[in-house]
Amino acid sequence: MRFLIPLGVFLVMVIFLAIGLSLDPRNLPSPLIGKPAPTFQLSKVEEPSQALTPESFRGRVILLNVWASWCVSCRQEHPVLLELAQRQEVPIFGLNYKDQLTAARDWLSKFGNPYEASGFDQDGRVGIDLGVYGVPETFVIDKKGLIRMKHTGPVTPQALEKDILPLVERLKQEP
Amino acid sequence: MKTLILLLTLTGSSALFATEIRSFADPDKAARYDRLIGELRCLVCQNQSLADSDADLAQDLRNEVYEMIAAGQSDAEAIRFLTDRYGDFVLYRPPIKPTTFLLWGGPLLILLFGGVMAWRYARQRKPQPLSPLSEADQDTLERLKKTSG
């Protein structure tokens, strides 16, 4: 019976270490969930004379996708966003984070533009207000302008079908 | 020349190169800024503080902290600015609240557990009955008593 105690301690350690290994340290809970999206006024990448503000999507459930032409994982998620845009289930807005205007526009014309509009956040201030720490990041914003979900890292088809789109459908039912 | 290069290599630390040079009119603000960026975590290189990290975001956040401190805002306001956006994760010293009770209390719990185990172990150990001295040992003892007395 004496061996039971060290065995128990060992098993508890194994369980905790296994949980620790399976967690993604980059996936941090955002304190912004349930809070209003920060206000901003940015010029549009596609048309710099026009402004993109939260008013542009007030009253609609939207995805706000943070991207940059220098971001490798953004290339990876890009086909997923393009396909989603074609399905017209939910409008996608972009936040072009710490990029060069010409590079961003080249990127969109080269790979396709899934965004209804992208705001040009050159100094990353809006990114900081959104708590962005790793591009790409995607926010689900409801009709009242509240942030309801944050997805860190590239949007995968699985994440879309399992988490993001079901939430979007639910939020569309809300007044 | 070689000595100079060696000296420069040995004295310059990477942390020194990571941060830009800041000037404050008030030395107290400079000290607060240095302490704050040493205590806040960079979200990109998660095991480095804002002071140590070379990441782009760390530089931006140092800028934010610098501007807030230079503008006369308090440490609490600067910390609040970051936790409102990035959560308690940016703090190397998280606040004590229900979700962090285990984190803060854990070491104490382990100490208590170890203490209880040690106490139980010590109590379980019964004193061994002494075996009586043999004839020869008894003689030696008597002899020693005489010589020392």
Image (cartoon, coloured by chain):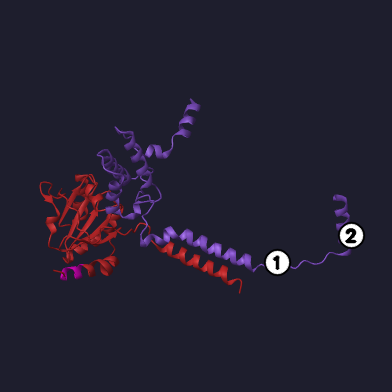
Chain colours: A red, B purple
Q: Give the range drawn in magenta.
A: A168-173
Q: Quick one: B143 or A110, which is closer to the camera? A: B143
Question: SS class of the residue under badge 1?
Answer: loop
Pick whichever of labels 1 and 2 is earlier in the sequence.
1
- Image marks 1 and 2: residues in contact by CB distance under 8 Å: no
Residue farthest bottom in this picture: A1
Position of A40 with respect to B51 (left or right) is left
Residue farthest top in this picture: B1
Looking at the image, which residue is at 88% across and 50% down? B147
Quarter of the picture containing the C terminus of chain A is bottom left
Q: Is residue A68 visible?
A: no
Choose top left, top right, bottom left or bottom right for residue A149. bottom left
Q: Quick one: A7 or B135, which is closer to the camera? A: B135
- Residue type, numbered disc 2: Asp
Q: Residue B15 location, x and y as percent?
A: 40, 40
Q: Residue B113 location, x and y as percent?
A: 52, 64
Looking at the image, which residue is at 30% across and 45% down? B61
Choose top left, top right, bottom left or bottom right for residue B37. top left
In this figure, which residue is indicated by the disc labeled 1?
A: B127
Q: How far is mark 1 from mark 2, CA to CA?
A: 26 Å
Kindly indicate whether the residues beneath marks 1 and 2 are on one polypeptide chain: yes
Looking at the image, which residue is at 42% across and 39% down? B14
- Residue type, numbered disc 1: Pro
Chain letter behind tag 1 = B
Q: Is residue A5 above or below residue A106?
A: below
- Magenta stretch holds residue A19: no
> How many marks overall?
2
| Prevailing secondary structure of the magenta residues | helix
Q: Is residue A81 visible?
A: yes
Position of B132 with respect to A88 (left or right) is right
In this figure, which residue is indicated by the disc labeled 2?
A: B139
